[in-house]
Amino acid sequence: MGAGYPESLSMVRGFAQAVAANREYLTQLDAEIGDADHGINMDRGMSAVVPKVEALTDHDISGLFRTVAMTLISTVGGASGPLYGTVFLQLASSLKGRSEVGLGEWAEAVSAAVAAVQSRGKAQPGDKTMVDALLPAAEALQAAQAEGVPFSEGLARATKAAHGGMEATIPLVARRGRASYLGERSAGHQDPGATSSWLLMEAAEAAFAKGK
Amino acid sequence: MGAGYPESLSMVRGFAQAVAANREYLTQLDAEIGDADHGINMDRGMSAVVPKVEALTDHDISGLFRTVAMTLISTVGGASGPLYGTVFLQLASSLKGRSEVGLGEWAEAVSAAVAAVQSRGKAQPGDKTMVDALLPAAEALQAAQAEGVPFSEGLARATKAAHGGMEATIPLVARRGRASYLGERSAGHQDPGATSSWLLMEAAEAAFAKGK
Amino acid sequence: MKKLINRPEDVVREELEGIAAAHSDRVRVSLDPYYVMRADAPVQGKVAVVSGGGSGHEPMHGGFVGMGMLDAACPGEVFTSPTPDQILAATKAVSGGAGVLHIVKNYTGDILNFEMAADLAKEDGILVEAVVTNDDVAVQDSLYTAGRRGVGVTVLAEKICGAAAEGGRSLSEVAELCRKVNANGRTMGMALTSCTVPAAGKPTFELGEDEMELGIGIHGEPGRERRQLATADEIVEVLATTVVDDLPFKSGDRVLAFVNGMGGTPLIELYVVYRALDRFLKGRGIAIERNLVGPYITSLEMAGTSITLLRLDDELVRLWDAPVNTPGLRWGA
Amino acid sequence: MKKLINRPEDVVREELEGIAAAHSDRVRVSLDPYYVMRADAPVQGKVAVVSGGGSGHEPMHGGFVGMGMLDAACPGEVFTSPTPDQILAATKAVSGGAGVLHIVKNYTGDILNFEMAADLAKEDGILVEAVVTNDDVAVQDSLYTAGRRGVGVTVLAEKICGAAAEGGRSLSEVAELCRKVNANGRTMGMALTSCTVPAAGKPTFELGEDEMELGIGIHGEPGRERRQLATADEIVEVLATTVVDDLPFKSGDRVLAFVNGMGGTPLIELYVVYRALDRFLKGRGIAIERNLVGPYITSLEMAGTSITLLRLDDELVRLWDAPVNTPGLRWGA
Ligand SMILES: Nc1ncnc2c1ncn2[C@@H]1O[C@H](COP(=O)(O)OP(=O)(O)O)[C@@H](O)[C@H]1O
Ligand SMILES: Nc1ncnc2c1ncn2[C@@H]1O[C@H](COP(=O)(O)OP(=O)(O)O)[C@@H](O)[C@H]1O
Ligand SMILES: [Mg+2]
Ligand SMILES: [Mg+2]
Ligand SMILES: [Mg+2]
Ligand SMILES: [Mg+2]
């Protein structure tokens, strides 16, 4: 079982919808330990992404993710623009030439994306950033692949791992991003970027699980 | 029966106390239709007056009122500084050379003070200013003098007239002073300067009525 | 009340001490009585320009003391006109023998205190002329009232008269020029929030989350009218229409457009207002030839704006462009 | 939310249109992508100085574009770093062949976006150096964290580097100078109120009537610590002590003292703060040789202040005093 272009497009649409639906929530989380714009930023970016990807005529998965990446980079700004741009740029390069994505490819692509985010942003696990949701998701996908579970099962585990990672950011003291300026006061609040990353994994699960 | 220097000094002290006690009230009235400083202004002035008059060695009524006037003029600012300064300057000049003040002298002095305020500030009765409290008081004193009632009775009538004039400012639309900028919106509020003028008449009554 | 102050009764003195410490290169400050004067005053043979009024409108007037603008400014307590002795002392200190112009905003208190001071200065042999600014179109004008308030045009008059005095004009010429500026300028303001007089400790008025005051002055006083909150474009439409229709400013007129912040409104919003004003005036065929955008005549921390238009001619443009070097306004020097 | 705006999503564009309308004598504005550049850019043979960051800090950075300061500024959305394509376009537009200095405030987003832009500009054959400002002593510094924020020193660095570039210094010299300014400057800020991001529609945080935030940045973020409201003198004592002890500034040092308003604090309060700072530094034997008092790096309508000290030497004094002609900072021109 694998996901083709339609599922990949549907994943992008689904992420855009999830971000729009959670715009206030993500912004509120950012208000607590940042500058109250994460939901606004991501929504501005994904709202710009949707018409761009709908207009694509060359139905290539890598090209799709590249378009998402370039659009996020040029519309979001902030930390999340380059970082989510990096995520999608890396997905695009990992999936270059593929017309179908299975558990193995997706596990590799997500792992490479997390690595790219870490190399751009220098965040370690436990620094209270999106890495704390993305890395457990990548590890869950890799483990699922090793165990040979179905794609849909692997996707579900990734979402769950991202969710767990996101919740685990609550007690952490931030060391990267704006929240780090609050020092100890950042503890007790969930990281907004980890939250949007969980939404991304959820969108991937919902869209890819529909692939034949 | 007349008031001497001690009663005149006591009137000044009493007015200072009344202003201090009504500092917030006068300021609140001014907040409604002005710039929220009448109580502050008058209290700054009368607080400066008290040590100045306590220090006077030459116990002359006219000199006392002149000191009050000059101190108000140099410490109050705003509209009320020059206007109350004018009141006391005129009292000083009307009572020049007198060591005792009776109903006749007081009626003349207050009437001259109102006239001086009107000539400085160009306010007509009904313009919603201190004139609306002072003028009825002056007229009541003149009438009392004509009727030949005792000083204490004349003073009581003056206070009452000032109070009535003050209350009568409530429905008026201001034509002078800051309240005039509010146009129709100034109606329904009591004029702060008329209120402090009533306090002045009350202080005069309380102090002079004790004179032998 | 949340303010960066110590005791309310010390605010004005401490502000003046701060100005003295910060700007001793350009101004000297007297603390008894309060006034701010040019460091090089009196300038012999030059008409001296003096203004003053309540504090709480910073940078006006103390921030406008310096070469090319005011010779002295007399700050009263917050929103309270200065006293005659301050004005007299400042007038004497900067008088350079060519006379002194008093620029007085039309408020009962300012008028009365400046009048008393002028009388005293004349007794001392100083030639004084007073010009009253009264540019606020929110207030209905009439012989039988206190008349219109002096607001935004005062800043422009101080700059322009300062330049003229610097250029050697006589007292009557500078006074005449001041009347000309006042006659050709109009202002209207609005507030999104009230402000708190330090000594009063609480806001002068309360405004709902969806309300604004139209036709305010600069003393935290309520406006002529309370209205439903509107967009910047709608607000500018109301203010600018009233201002333009009053003079009236006509198609073909050249103007200086002054978008003023009331103290608590950030610059980002003032540029949104300026954009709307620019479009509005273009629509009326009125050309903005000079502009000023920022908090120059404020009402403590009030949020809001006022729009001032001044009809220009070549003389006014030249004087506006002349060098000025004050803490609050500076160019060409 | 009470603001002089139209739709929240249009604030930055409309602000830029306002700047374009008001200051076309000195700057040109690109709306796609957003940037503000000197009207006379590119200046051939001169190092170009470019900065940028989220909007909401006006006059920084757009107000500092002009002769003697920035060649271009890239405004992001409110409190959001600009995107690489904006920075790239601005960099290309002002590049005069002598290289471009990027002055970047230390925020993850600013760093990442400027880095991407610099990579792209280099591909286009433009010499770019980036210097990161990180002067905020409220934040504990460490290799393992995002480090200190760039705040008030950024304004001073832009002025000083702009003067050096104007004076013909090379890119590496101007970059070195920028690092020197950053190394010798320290800042700490506090807030009396929060501010409201237009798109968010409500205050970023809530503060009680008797509370303040200490150690804030410039993005409406809460500070490091919430404390009981204090007097201006006490607040200055805390801020200045932290700033002075950090570098540390020592007796005999000459400094530039910058008392900044956060956007909603009126000038009268900033002078009360300046007075306290002046006294504090005198007590430590530190001489204020230059100063800047006003809202120059703001957080929308937040009430509060920040104190920046920069240790001066003759070179920095000379460059600070050099002529500058921007909408937000002007002298000598
Ligand atoms: N260095 C970093 N590495 C990974 N993620 C980061 C880093 N810095 C910030 N983030 C993420 O970005 C999120 C904030 O994004 P956003 O609010 O859109 O940008 P900004 O902080 O510039 O306002 C944080 O919640 C965090 O998850
Ligand atoms: N032209 C005038 N004639 C008489 N009284 C006046 C005049 N203008 C103002 N007042 C009085 O002064 C009072 C206001 O005084 P105050 O608040 O101290 O001064 P300001 O208006 O300058 O703030 C008004 O309530 C009114 O009674
Ligand atoms: Mg954010
Ligand atoms: Mg008053
Ligand atoms: Mg007053
Ligand atoms: Mg941001």
Image: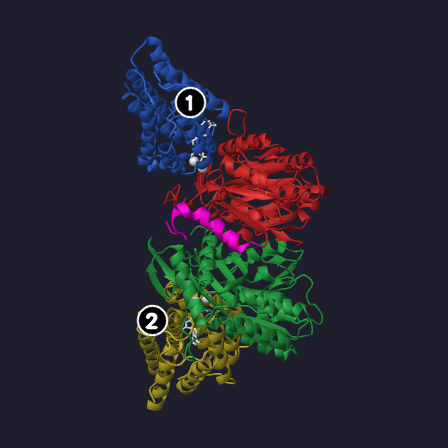
Chain colours: A yellow, B blue, C red, D green
Q: Which residues are magenta?
A: C1-24
Q: Is residue C14 covered in magenta?
A: yes
Q: Circle 1 is placed at which residue position?
A: B91
Residue type, mark 2 in image = Glu
Ligand 3 quadrant assignment? bottom left
Q: Quadrant of the C terminus of chain A?
A: bottom left
Query: In this view of the protein, which residue sits in the foreground, D86 or D144?
Result: D144
Q: For mark 1, name the chain.
A: B
In the image, which disc is placed on residue A184? Answer: 2
Marker count (numbered):
2
Q: Residues within 10 Å of mark 2 (few under 14, many from 20)?
A: some
Rendered position, B172 above or below C317: above
Which element carries disc 2, helix, strand or loop? Answer: helix
The answer to whether residue B22 is seen in the rendering is yes
Distance from the alpha carbon under mark 2 to that under mark 1: 68 Å
Query: In this view of the protein, which residue sits in the foreground, A169 or C79?
Result: C79
Residue type, mark 1 in image = Leu
Q: Is residue D308 covered in magenta?
A: no
In the image, which disc is placed on residue D27? Answer: none
What is the x, y in percent for residue C69? 62, 46
Q: With B21 as the anchor, is C144 left or right in this view? A: right
